[in-house]
Image (tube, rainbow, N blue to C red):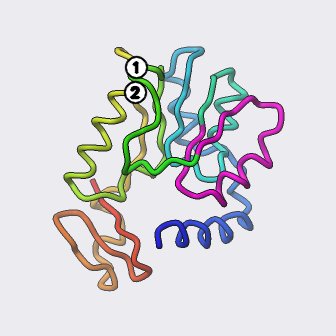
Amino acid sequence: MIKDYWKKTHEIYSKKDWINNTTIFAQFAAGHFPKQGKLLDLGAGQGQDSRYFAKLGYDVTSTDISDAALKLSKENADGLGIKFMEVDIANKLPFEDNCFDIVYSHLALHYFTDEKTREVFQEIFRVLKPQGILASLFNTTEDAETTDPSYTLIEKDYYKSPEGLLKRYF
């Protein structure tokens, strides 16, 4: 179900003007990163931020649960040396311990229960080098969805959308 949701979502996103633009968050975060290193982009979607980081000289591994998103991302990344992997963040990350200088995630770490969220962060810190940087953008409890009556509260700050998508707000 989740893969079908993201396949449909990325089909819609691929027609939007903004989909190939680097996010403001990526531009901001890059100013706080070391000048080089290995960067893991978790939930990279169609890869606009992965491409941005690769152009800045980072060794980028771009991951997403959606093979459709990764396919679109690859089409726009010729010559950038980005490694692409289909990865479900909810599972053990398929990387060695302490192998990334930076773990970056733009709105991809908030789809889990409280317990699963804790496991996800344990995995992130396992693959992140000591003194590495985690940069992640989250939805907040101030977002409009949290008061939308069509959203169902599952647990504190964790909702189900009318389409069936589960999302946590911080």
Q: Disc 2 designates what residue? A: 127
| Residue at x 53%, y 38% (from the top left corner) | 41
Q: Residues within 10 Å of mark 1 (few under 14, many from 20)?
A: some
Vertical placement of residue 146 versus 44, above or below:
below
**Mark 1 element type:** loop
The part of the image, by quadrant, that contains residue 137 is: top left
Left or right placement of residue 42 versus residue 49 in this view: left
Q: Which residue is mark 1?
A: 98
In the rendered image, residue 21, in percent from the top left (x then y), is placed at 70, 48
Identify the secondary structure beneath mark 2: helix
Type of the residue with mark 2:
Val
Distance (Cα) linking label 1 and label 2? 5 Å
Q: Where does the magenta region start and end?
A: 62-85
Q: Quick check: marks 1 and 2 in contact, CB under 8 Å? A: yes
Give the answer, above or below, for where 33 lies relative to 154: above
Where is residue 144 shown, x and y percent of the image?
A: 36, 70
Location of residue 147 (image quadrant)? bottom left
Along the horizontal axis of the image, is 67 left or right of 143? right
Give, as a three-letter code, the residue at label 1: Asn
